[in-house]
Amino acid sequence: MHSRFCRETIALSESGSSPGAALALASFGLLLSQQRSALGLIVFGLLIAFPNTILAYSLHAYQSELYPTRIRARAVGFTYSWSRFSTIFVDFFIVLFLRP
Protein backbone atom coordinates (compact mmCIF):
# COMPACT_ATOMS: atom_id res chain seq x y z
CA MET A 1 0.00 0.00 0.00
CA HIS A 2 2.77 2.43 0.94
CA SER A 3 4.70 1.85 -2.30
CA ARG A 4 1.60 2.60 -4.38
CA PHE A 5 1.12 6.03 -2.83
CA CYS A 6 4.83 6.79 -2.95
CA ARG A 7 4.95 6.14 -6.69
CA GLU A 8 2.05 8.54 -7.24
CA THR A 9 3.72 11.22 -5.16
CA ILE A 10 6.99 10.75 -7.00
CA ALA A 11 5.28 10.89 -10.39
CA LEU A 12 3.63 14.20 -9.52
CA SER A 13 6.22 16.11 -7.58
CA GLU A 14 9.70 14.58 -7.60
CA SER A 15 11.03 16.83 -10.32
CA GLY A 16 8.95 19.77 -9.17
CA SER A 17 7.60 20.26 -12.68
CA SER A 18 3.93 19.81 -11.83
CA PRO A 19 3.69 22.38 -9.01
CA GLY A 20 5.88 24.78 -10.97
CA ALA A 21 3.80 24.34 -14.10
CA ALA A 22 0.59 24.87 -12.14
CA LEU A 23 1.95 28.08 -10.65
CA ALA A 24 3.14 29.29 -14.06
CA LEU A 25 -0.23 28.44 -15.61
CA ALA A 26 -2.10 30.39 -12.93
CA SER A 27 0.26 33.35 -13.21
CA PHE A 28 0.16 33.52 -16.99
CA GLY A 29 -3.62 33.08 -16.95
CA LEU A 30 -4.04 36.04 -14.62
CA LEU A 31 -1.69 38.13 -16.74
CA LEU A 32 -3.54 37.08 -19.90
CA SER A 33 -6.79 38.34 -18.45
CA GLN A 34 -5.28 41.82 -18.05
CA GLN A 35 -4.03 42.18 -21.62
CA ARG A 36 -5.48 44.86 -23.88
CA SER A 37 -3.37 44.43 -27.00
CA ALA A 38 -3.30 41.65 -29.57
CA LEU A 39 0.42 41.09 -29.03
CA GLY A 40 -0.10 40.63 -25.27
CA LEU A 41 -2.88 38.12 -25.90
CA ILE A 42 -0.70 36.14 -28.29
CA VAL A 43 2.37 36.16 -26.04
CA PHE A 44 0.55 35.13 -22.87
CA GLY A 45 -1.58 32.63 -24.80
CA LEU A 46 1.63 30.95 -25.95
CA LEU A 47 3.09 31.11 -22.45
CA ILE A 48 0.01 29.29 -21.16
CA ALA A 49 0.48 26.49 -23.69
CA PHE A 50 3.87 25.38 -22.30
CA PRO A 51 2.93 24.71 -18.66
CA ASN A 52 -0.36 23.23 -19.85
CA THR A 53 1.62 20.66 -21.86
CA ILE A 54 3.81 19.84 -18.86
CA LEU A 55 0.73 19.30 -16.70
CA ALA A 56 -0.83 17.05 -19.35
CA TYR A 57 2.31 14.88 -19.50
CA SER A 58 2.44 14.69 -15.72
CA LEU A 59 -1.21 13.67 -15.57
CA HIS A 60 -0.71 10.85 -18.07
CA ALA A 61 2.28 9.52 -16.10
CA TYR A 62 0.17 9.59 -12.92
CA GLN A 63 -2.93 8.20 -14.61
CA SER A 64 -1.32 4.83 -15.30
CA GLU A 65 -0.81 4.31 -11.57
CA LEU A 66 -4.53 4.54 -10.80
CA TYR A 67 -5.53 1.17 -12.23
CA PRO A 68 -4.52 -2.42 -11.54
CA THR A 69 -1.99 -3.85 -13.97
CA ARG A 70 -4.39 -6.27 -15.67
CA ILE A 71 -6.81 -3.52 -16.79
CA ARG A 72 -4.35 -0.61 -16.98
CA ALA A 73 -4.12 -0.23 -20.77
CA ARG A 74 -7.87 -0.43 -21.30
CA ALA A 75 -8.68 1.94 -18.42
CA VAL A 76 -6.11 4.56 -19.40
CA GLY A 77 -7.21 4.36 -23.03
CA PHE A 78 -10.84 4.80 -22.04
CA THR A 79 -10.21 7.79 -19.79
CA TYR A 80 -7.91 9.44 -22.34
CA SER A 81 -10.47 8.94 -25.13
CA TRP A 82 -13.27 10.25 -22.93
CA SER A 83 -11.27 13.37 -22.07
CA ARG A 84 -10.59 14.01 -25.77
CA PHE A 85 -14.27 13.51 -26.60
CA SER A 86 -15.41 15.81 -23.81
CA THR A 87 -13.27 18.67 -25.14
CA ILE A 88 -15.66 18.88 -28.08
CA PHE A 89 -18.25 20.40 -25.78
CA VAL A 90 -15.98 22.80 -23.87
CA ASP A 91 -16.27 25.56 -26.48
CA PHE A 92 -20.03 25.36 -26.40
CA PHE A 93 -20.07 25.70 -22.60
CA ILE A 94 -17.70 28.66 -22.74
CA VAL A 95 -19.98 30.44 -25.20
CA LEU A 96 -23.02 29.58 -23.11
CA PHE A 97 -21.51 31.01 -19.91
CA LEU A 98 -19.96 34.10 -21.51
CA ARG A 99 -23.01 35.12 -23.51
CA PRO A 100 -24.59 38.26 -22.00
Image (tube, rainbow, N blue to C red):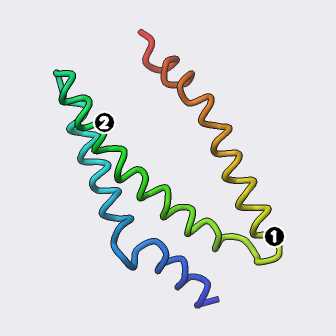
Q: Amino acid at mark 1?
A: Ile
N-term-proximal mark, 2 vs 1? 2
Looking at the rendered image, the quarter that the C terminus falls into is: top left
Q: In the figure, residue 5 lies in which quadrant?
A: bottom right
Residue 74 horizontal/vertical position (percent): 79, 62
Query: Which residue occupies the extreme bottom position in the image?
Result: 2
Q: Count residues near mark 1 (Cα–Cα under 10 Å), then give few for <14, some for 14-19, many for 20+.
A: few
Residue identified by numbered label 1? 71
In this rendering, the answer to whether 77 lies above or below 46 is below
Residue found at x 47% / y 80%: 10
Dots 2, 1 in contact, CB < 8 A: no
Residue 45 tag number: 2
C-alpha distance separating marks 2 and 1: 37 Å
Q: In the figure, residue 67 lies in which quadrant?
A: bottom right
Residue 65 horizontal/vertical position (percent): 64, 74
In this rendering, the answer to whether 26 lies above or below 14 is above
In this rendering, the answer to whether 35 lies above or below 70 is above
In this picture, residue 64 sits left or right of residue 15: right
Q: Nearer the viewer, mark 2 or mark 1?
A: 2
Q: In the figure, residue 86 lies in which quadrant?
A: top right
Q: Amino acid at mark 2?
A: Gly
Query: Which residue occupies the extreme top position in the image?
Result: 100
Residue 39 tag number: none
Residue 39 horizontal/vertical position (percent): 19, 27
Q: Secondary structure at mark 2?
A: helix
Residue 50 horizontal/vertical position (percent): 35, 50
Q: Secondary structure at mark 1?
A: helix
In this rendering, the answer to whether 58 lies above or below 50 is below
In this picture, residue 65 sits left or right of residue 7: right
- Please state which of residues 69 and 100 is positioned toward the viewer in this rendering: 69
